């Protein structure tokens, strides 16, 4: 299966810029749809969890729609899932945002307020992501053909703190260094917005589409 | 590393770009989405669309523009013009815009900023200010924080910061004004007055005081246009840029007057977080990539592709 015939579903739980993610996926050649229907999400070759907003409310919405269990089920099947911004944060064990809430528990660790020092929050704008300083994941297919340092567009006040440094794929600095890209199994997460990060972002989404295509290809006899 | 931004601005009327030239990689110089996608490919960090359409069907027009842009523009984009309510902003943001810019509607009803920020977050709310210098004799210069009732003016015949300005006439005589052709930084204690979008109606509001109030209410960014410099290619009003950047904690986008690449450097060194550019790019004088290279050579952190 090629990246052009791969079908990627953007998980719609009522929060975040679904449309921009959908259009960027289409731009890199994937067939994209936005849906909260379980059947559609089960049929897709890969899933994207978008999201802008508060962590507790987002988890509440996912549970109301039964999407938390569905995401875990699909990950157990080895289906690639990409969490974007809040969608990445939701994959962690918990967040301290607004009094705290439990997350999906896909990636061990906690989501905490950015320690930006004097710099103001939210952190908004283009920031250089460093893929080389993260150990262990230099060869990740998600960042194939991207330079080791590359600017991506960020809008956030919270950031994930993975318990296992092996899960870290990329970091950036805003007052202090924070984790901005992770991978664990077939889950990929980026704190930045690839759909708003011009050529570099489109390259990353194209890589994700290829990851989905490879995962969906029938195993050779 | 936090990067300073270069932002092309497109004036749109009835769905078409007001000024613009043909670039080799686009088919239709009048199509705002094609032009914006061109600037994205050239390395623009964001794009601003200002809709100057003077009709009541604005909300549909700008939502359509936002939807079309989301298909082809993969950097953040802001839409301004005709947004007067949370519902107006919702339509544009749902269609794929990242931020909305408000100007006259916020001057008329400042609470709009509180409403937008509480629903969408300050990061989605840009306050555009059209600023005009006032001389030392002007009441605003003597009492910078004083409030004045709006002066009486003939009704505005259109909108948009880039239109040619009619001779300034608000009832004061010329002798009330310091000669604005003098270099900005040699002027005595200065102030600026906020005008309604389009620049024909004075509001009596001091620009610095208005910027401060707007940020307190929830504006996440100030798009600061110098009406004196807009269209002149003489450079940004650096004193204005500096005054507002120092007064507020949020990013200031300098606008109006860029004619040379060095002007961009000057505005960013004066405290702006971003520079808005129109004719310098639209008329093919410079490319975004050239602007980025110039800024990088001057030691300003910019995203270079």
Image (cartoon, coloured by chain):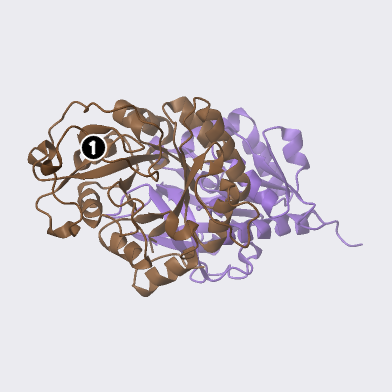
Extreme-bottom residue of the structure: B297
Identified at 64% across, 35% down, the residue is A67
Task: Please give the letter of the chain rendered in purple.
Answer: A
One can see residue B29 in this view: yes
Disc 1 chain ID = B
| A197 relative to A207 in the view: left or right | left
* Residue B109 found in image quarter: top left
Task: Give the side of residue A110 with respect to residue A221, left or right.
Answer: left
The percent position of residue B227, horizontal first and vertical second, equals 30, 46
Is residue A40 left or right of B279 when viewed as pictured? right
Say if B160 sits above or below B295 in the image.
Answer: above
Report the chain shown in brown.
B
- B305 or B137: which is nearer to us? B137
Badge 1 is on which residue? B210
**Which residue is pictured at 56% across the width and 69% down the height?**
A136
Residue A77 screen position, x and y as percent: 74, 48
Decide which of B205, A100 is in the foreground and name it.
B205
On the question of residue A106 being in view, the answer is no
Dot 1: element? helix
Query: How many residues crowd mark 1 within 10 Å: few (<14), some (14–19), many (20+)?
Result: some
Q: In the rendering, at what x and y percent does residue A215 appear?
A: 76, 56
In front of the other: A94 or B52: B52
Taking the spot 44% from the left edge, 48% from the top edge, the residue there is A155
Q: Is residue A153 left or right of residue B186?
A: right
Q: Position of residue A51 (x, y in %)?
A: 54, 41
In which quadrant of the rendered image does the C terminus of chain A lie? bottom right
Above or below A127: residue B297: below
């Amino acid at each position: 299966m090629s990246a052009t015939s791969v079908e990627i579903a953007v998980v719609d739980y009522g929060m975040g810029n679904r449309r921009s993610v959908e259009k960027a996926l289409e731009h890199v050649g994937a067939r994209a749809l936005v849906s909260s229907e379980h059947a559609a999400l089960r049929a897709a070759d890969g899933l994207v969890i978008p999201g802008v907003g508060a962590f507790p409310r987002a988890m509440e919405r996912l549970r109301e729609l039964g999407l938390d269990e569905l995401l875990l089920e699909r990950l157990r099947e080895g289906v690639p899932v990409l969490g974007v911004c809040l969608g990445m944060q939701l994959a962690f064990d918990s967040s301290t945002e607004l009094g705290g809430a439990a997350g999906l528990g896909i990636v061990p660790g906690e989501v905490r307020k950015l320690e930006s020092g004097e710099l103001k929050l939210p952190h908004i704008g283009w920031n250089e992501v460093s893929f080389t300083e993260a150990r262990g994941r230099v060869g990740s297919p998600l960042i194939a053909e991207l330079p080791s340092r590359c600017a991506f567009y960020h809008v956030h006040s919270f950031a994930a703190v993975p318990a296992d440094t092996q899960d870290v794929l990329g970091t950036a600095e805003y007052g202090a260094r924070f984790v901005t890209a992770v991978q664990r199994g077939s889950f990929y997460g980026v704190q930045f917005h690839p759909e708003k990060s011009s050529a570099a972002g489109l390259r990353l989404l194209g890589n994700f589409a290829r990851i989905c295509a490879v995962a969906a290809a029938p195993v050779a006899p | 590393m936090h990067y300073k931004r270069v932002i092309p601005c497109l004036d749109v009327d009835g769905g078409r770009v007001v000024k613009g030239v043909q670039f080799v990689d686009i088919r239709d110089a009048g199509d705002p989405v094609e032009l914006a996608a061109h600037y994205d490919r050239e390395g623009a960090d964001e794009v601003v669309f200002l809709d100057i359409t003077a009709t009541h069907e604005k909300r549909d027009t700008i939502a359509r523009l936002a939807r079309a842009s989301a298909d082809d523009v993969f950097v953040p984009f802001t839409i301004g013009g005709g947004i007067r309510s949370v519902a107006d902003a919702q339509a544009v943001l749902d269609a794929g815009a990242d931020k909305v810019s408000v100007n006259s509607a916020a001057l008329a009803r400042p609470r709009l900023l509180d409403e937008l920020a509480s629903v969408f977050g300050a990061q989605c709310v840009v306050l555009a200010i059209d600023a005009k210098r006032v001389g030392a004799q002007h009441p605003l210069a003597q009492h910078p924080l004083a409030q004045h009732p709006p002066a009486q003016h003939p009704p505005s015949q259109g909108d948009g910061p880039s239109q040619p300005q009619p001779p300034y006439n608000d009832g004061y005589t010329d002798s009330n004004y310091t000669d604005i052709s003098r270099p900005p930084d040699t002027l005595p204690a200065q102030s600026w007055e906020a005008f309604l979008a389009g620049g024909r109606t004075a509001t009596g509001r001091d620009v610095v005081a208005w910027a401060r109030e707007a940020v307190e209410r929830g504006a996440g960014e100030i798009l600061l246009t110098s009406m004196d410099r807009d269209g002149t290619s003489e450079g940004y009003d650096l004193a204005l840029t500096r005054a507002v950047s120092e007064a507020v904690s949020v990013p200031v986008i300098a606008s109006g007057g860029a004619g040379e690449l060095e002007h961009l450097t000057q505005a960013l060194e004066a405290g702006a977080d971003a520079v808005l550019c129109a004719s310098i790019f639209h008329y093919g004088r410079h490319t975004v990539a050239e602007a980025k290279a110039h800024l990088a050579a001057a030691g300003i952190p910019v995203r270079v592709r």
